[in-house]
Structure formats: structure tokens, C-alpha cells
Amino acid sequence: GTLDGDGLRLEVRDHGIGYDPRYADKLFQPFQRLHGVDEGAGNGLGLAIAQRIAARHGGRISARSEPGAGATFTIELPAGGAD
């Protein structure tokens, strides 16, 4: 991660099957899988939970991908100091 102004920016990349950007609006919704069970395990909760954790800490999470090219997830959080 890197400090970016008043925030922390973290990028996580994978080399998986990616996803079609046309369906990006479903990516962070609970139980919305963009792939069939035969293309990967999971129940469609992981990214929804990650997004809610980021929001609770005053941040956000976003993603970009293309089918067959993996995905990059960007987490941005405030870099608040200890009080």
C-alpha cells in the first residue's frame, strides 16, 4: 500500500478469470456471483463484506477487470493517526 494524501491506498491483484465489466454493479452485492459454481467456489459474500468493512472505516473499495485477465481491487482508507 501507499500513502495517498490523507489516505492509505492498497491494491490487490489476482490472476483469476476476471469478470465482465458490464456486471460490475453486482460485484459488491451479497449473493451476486458473476461466475457459475464450476468456475470458482464461493457464495457471493466475500466482496460484499469487504466493501462494508471499508465503508465502516470511512473508506471504499473498487475493482477493475476484464474477462480472462484477472482483477485488481483498490481499497482506500483514511490514514488517521492514533489518538
Image: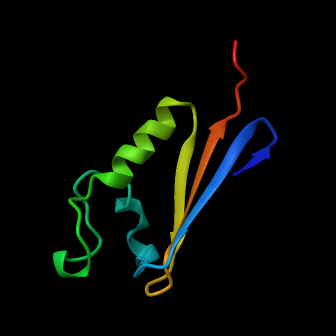
- Where residue 49 appears, x then y in whole percent? 35, 44
Q: Give me the residue at 38% from left, 70% from top.
A: 23
Q: Position of residue 24 (x, y in %)?
A: 42, 66
Q: How many marks?
A: 0
Q: Which quarter shows the C terminus?
A: top right
User: How was the colour assigned to the protein in this rendering?
Assistant: rainbow
Q: Is residue 77 left or right of residue 34?
A: right
Q: Is residue 57 above or below residue 28?
A: above
* Residue farthest bottom in this picture: 68
| Above or below, 19 relative to 13 | below
Q: Position of residue 51 (x, y in %)?
A: 44, 45
Q: Residue furthest right?
A: 5
Q: Nearer the viewer, residue 35 or 83?
A: 83
Task: Compare residues 35 and 15 and report the one nearer the observer.
Answer: 15
- Residue at the image point whose x is 44% and y is 84% from the top: 67
In this rendering, position of residue 35 left or right of residue 61: left
Decide: is 80 above or below 5: above
In the image, taking residue 3 as reference, residue 60 lies left or right, namely left
Which residue of the protein is positioned furthest toward the top in this rendering? 83
User: Which quarter of the picture shows residue 80?
Assistant: top right
Judge whether 33 appears above or below 59 on screen. Answer: below
Q: Residue at x 27, y 52 (%)?
A: 45
36 on left or right of 66 = left
Percent across and percent down for residue 63 are 52, 63
